[in-house]
Image (spheres, rainbow, N blue to C red):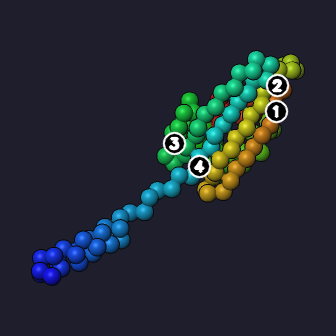
Amino acid sequence: MPLTLIRRAVAVPAFAAALFATAAPAHAETGQLEITRHDVRSGEKRQWFLACDPDGGTHPDPIGACDGLRGSDADLERLRFGPAPCAKIYDPVEVEIVGYWNEEPRRFRHQYPNPCYVRYQAAPVVP
């Protein structure tokens, strides 16, 4: 085998190994969630994707939603409760959130009495 072919055969795997060894590890996202909002009476169903760290996705306010989730370590149960000065009109809204936060699975499902409760209890995570 000629000397130049031996050098190339050794150099290519050595270069590839050095490249992978010195490459910075990929930044893992904190969270990836799919948020579904279903207005039961009208039948309208909307869905958004939310990514955090870096904040983005199809969610209309990814920074606000991710900040809200980071403040509670994505404790989605907090989206069920809270003061809501809402009229007692029955116009149900079903919300489902499925995904991962810090590589741990998250699942949330709740039916709010009307859209006002969603605004006061689940925003900005749920648009």
Residue occupying image coordinates x 73% and y 38%: 96
Label 3 amino acid? Asp
Q: CA distance from mark 2 to mark 3?
A: 29 Å
Residue 120 lies, with reference to residue 44, above or below; the image says below
Q: Residue at 30% of width from left, 69% of height from top?
A: 16
Q: Nearer the viewer, residue 62 or 4?
A: 4
- 16 with respect to 3 (left or right): right
Circles 1 and 4 in contact, beta carbons < 8 Å: no
Q: CA distance from mark 3 to mark 4?
A: 9 Å
Residue occupied by mark 2:
92
Mark found first going from the N terminus, 2 or 4? 4
Give percent across and percent down for residue 1: 15, 82
What amino acid type is highlighted by mark number 4?
A: Gly
The numbered mark, 1 or 3, whose residue comes first in the sequence reads 3
Three-letter amino acid code of the residue under disc 1: Gln
- N-terminal label among 1 and 4: 4
Query: In this figure, which residue is indicated by the disc labeled 1?
Result: 111
Of the two numbered discs 1 and 2 on the same chain, state the one appearing first in sequence: 2
Task: Work out whether mark 3 precedes mark 4 in sequence or the reverse, and give the earlier one.
Answer: 4
Given the image, on which type of amino acid does mark 2 rest?
Pro
Few, some or many residues within 10 Å of mark 1 (<14, 14–19, 20+):
some
Residue at the disc numbered 3 = 55
Q: Which residue is mark 4?
A: 31
- Whole-number angstrom distance, CA of label 1 to CA of label 2: 6 Å
**Callout 2: SS:** loop
